[in-house]
Amino acid sequence: MLNLYKLGKLSLNETLDEIIKDKNQESMDIDRKKEINESKKNLENIIKELDSLIGLKNVKSLVKEIQAFVEIQEKRKEANLLTDPVVLHMIFKGSPGTGKTTVARLIGKILKEMGVLEKGHIVEVERADIVGEYIGHTAVKVKQQIKKALGGILFIDEAYSLARGGEKDFGKEAIDALVKAMEDNKDNLVLILAGYNDEMENFLKINPGLKSRFPIHVEFRDYSINELINIAEEMANKKEYKLTDKAIHKLETILEAKNNHKNIGNARFVRNMVERSIRKQAVRLQGKSSLNRDDLIFIKEEDIEGDDIY
């Protein structure tokens, strides 16, 4: 620029404008690089968090497939090649407490860092949040929840309940409104329908048009007893407690005895047991005149209780 000015090809004002423009572009390039590096770092941390979850091997593989797919589609776009649309609406099938909501939150964060979703937040709703009580009410309720979820994930738990209620029920209207919202906001919304395996299968059979709109189906399997024990130990460790060997053995015995019960293979049941054991430990220690560090840390066999009923 200065050379052109010296040669008389640019005026002083034009030269200054060009210098300022170059400086601004350079500053924007530096900011963009920082933003990209920060997103990469955030993405790595989220993937680490996912990998740290106990079990969920198939779910982790799926998330990494989605990550790879999005990255490669972006590279194909840069190379002026045909790209597939990034349609990531999902069906999550499994019992409560098997990690569905946790994984949905992590997927939202991943898609945000990859630039697929603007915000990456999750809005959790159930039937009552989107099904109205009179004509026209359902469309308004669905629109309100969609507006909250734009830029992120709308997570509908027990989605099969939308098909219940008979001909006069407004659940079918909610389904139709959701399908329309999926089309209208396909670049800025991911919809996840979640619920028990069998109920979700029946729900999709009753509404055959839905299955093709949700290309990703994920099964959240019940945790094994060993995985549940690992989850219990991890929960306790995060709160700076430790289970003694005898406490772990009692926990294992309780889990084995309840193994055939519905919903026992989930983390929620174990979390409730850990939280109650902490309260039981507090009652046990309350009357003691002197306590050392180990007393305050260790959960003993007598602190483990199998039932939540008082």
Image (cartoon, helix red, strand yellow):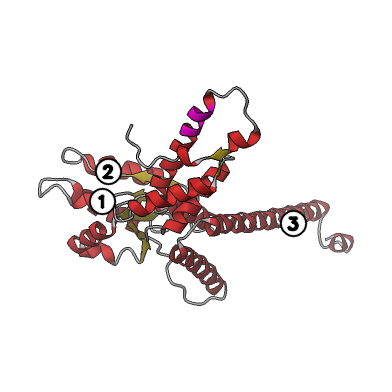
User: What residue lies at 83% left-to-right and 53% top-to-bottom?
Assistant: 12
Q: Where's residue 169, x and y in %?
A: 14, 45
Residue type highlighted by circle 2 = Ile
The tag earlier along the polypeptide, 1 or 3, is: 3
Disc 2 element: helix
User: 241 or 32: nearer the eye?
Assistant: 241
- For the residues marked 3 and 2, what is the alpha-carbon distance in whole angstroms? 48 Å
The x and y percentages for residue 200 are 26, 58
Q: Is residue 127 left or right of residue 47?
A: left
Mark 1 → mark 2, Cα distance in angstroms: 10 Å
Among numbered discs 1 and 2, the one appearing first in the sequence = 2
Foreground disc of the pair 3, 2: 2
96 on left or right of 298:
left
In contact (CB < 8 Å): disc 1 and disc 3: no
Q: Residues within 10 Å of mark 3 (few under 14, many from 20)?
A: few
Looking at the image, do the residues carrying marks 3 and 2 touch, with CB atoms under 8 Å apart?
Answer: no
Cα distance between the residues tagged 1 and 3: 46 Å
Residue at the extreme right: 6
Q: Earlier in the sequence, mark 3 or mark 2?
A: 3
Residue for badge 2: 130
The structure residue drawn at horizontal position 47% and vertical position 56%, both measured from the top left corner, is 107
Mark 1 vs mark 2: give the one in front: 2
Q: Which residue is mark 1?
A: 177
Residue 26: image tag? 3
Front one among 159 and 258: 258
Numbered range of the magenta stretch: 280-285
Decide: few, some or many residues near mark 2? Use Cα within 10 Å; few <14, some 14-19, many ≥20.
many
> Residue 239 appears in which quarter of the rendering?
top right
- Which amino acid type is shown beneath numbered disc 1? Ala
Query: Which secondary structure dominates the residues rendered in magenta?
Result: helix
Q: Nearer the viewer, residue 92 or 5?
A: 92
Residue 265 appears in the rendering: no
